[in-house]
Amino acid sequence: MKTWALYSLKGGVGKTAAAVNLAYEAAAAGRHVLLWDLDPQGAASWYFGIDEPAGISAKKIVTGTVPLGRYVRPTAYERLSVLPGDRGYRQWDAEIHAAKSPRKVLERLIEPFSETYSLLILDCPPGIGALATAILRAADRVLVPVVPTPLSLRALDEVMEHIAEKKVGKTRVRPFFSMADRRRTLHRQLIAEPPESMARAPEVFVDYSSHVEQMGAHRAPIREFAPRSRAATQFAELYRALD
Ligand SMILES: Nc1ncnc2c1ncn2[C@@H]1O[C@H](COP(=O)(O)OP(=O)(O)OP(=O)(O)O)[C@@H](O)[C@H]1O
Ligand SMILES: [Mg+2]
């Protein structure tokens, strides 16, 4: 099982949009996929039609009182399951800090899923605490959406510094441009001449698209309601570039 984390220090950069569409593409390509929505807001789960709070507590999970697998839910799509987000995840950082080996918490929790799934996608909340460190360690790929603006690039630099400090594999980080608006000069310039920190980025990137916004109305991955849209094509290409 491979683990891909959609992660950024910054909020609202397209982590959840990418997690949902990449999970869908991977399942469509024949992989058995589990999407773990680690965000207390549960946006990724909501896109897959999951409304009911599962009543998950970060404490019970971290201490192993309740096995995580109990909460896995099927989706409307073949080979794609979701581990829903829950308000009980607001205590992630505190619970992980309190654990015996905080950095290994996530690795230990996801290990049993390797019997059932070939790809685990983590949709992470923004931030850079104990959860982030555990995620950076557990993931084979850390996918960082970067809006082509100086501030978003600065956030990427901070992530790279954090990674260097914590000595978790730097080479696993794959930034990619997200919400790119090529009508904007600044976006165009940064895409044409990306800084050194984007050296490992795949060629493909995700444009700003109303189809991403429409996911909220359809509560589905883009390819389900706009199969020929550029956004659907870009997420499919992104999946292939990362696979
Ligand atoms: N490529 C895109 N084009 C247009 N809108 C987008 C795009 N990607 C994301 N959005 C919109 O931006 C908002 C934030 O996106 P998303 O929830 O994916 O970001 P996030 O990084 O997961 O945010 P958070 O940190 O709050 O979890 C949403 O309203 C979404 O519809
Ligand atoms: Mg999100």
Image (cartoon, rainbow, N blue to C red):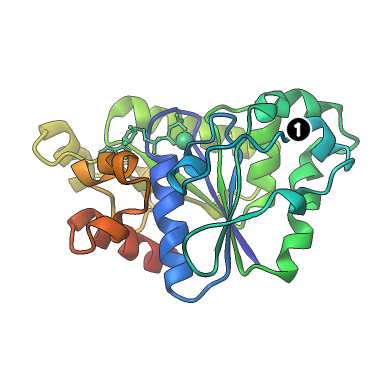
> Can you tell which quarter of the image residue 28 is in?
bottom left
Placement of the N terminus among the 4 image quadrants: bottom right
Question: Can the viewer see residue 53 in this picture?
Answer: yes
Q: Nearer the viewer, residue 213 or 3?
A: 213
* Count of marks placed on residues: 1
Q: Nearer the viewer, residue 225 or 124?
A: 225
Would you say 217 lies left or right of 1 here?
A: left
Q: On screen, 222 above or below 215?
A: below
Residue at the spot x=19%, y=57% of the render? 230
Residue at the spot x=33%, y=58% of the render? 235
Would you say 105 lies left or right of 198 here?
A: right
Question: Can the viewer see residue 243 in this picture?
Answer: no
- The 10 Å Cα crowd at callout 1, few under 14, some 14 to 19, many 20 or more, is many
Residue at the far bottom: name it: 30
Q: Nearer the viewer, residue 11 or 216?
A: 216
> What SS does tag 1 mark?
helix
Would you say 12 lies left or right of 101 here?
A: left
Which residue does the numbered mark 1 point to in the structure image?
58
Residue at the spot x=47%, y=46% of the render? 49
Three-letter code, disc 1: Ala
Q: Nearer the viewer, residue 48 or 166?
A: 48
Q: In x, y percent, where is residue 183?
A: 8, 37
Q: In x, y percent, where is residue 134?
A: 71, 40
Residue at the far front: name it: 52
Q: On screen, 17 above or below 96?
A: below
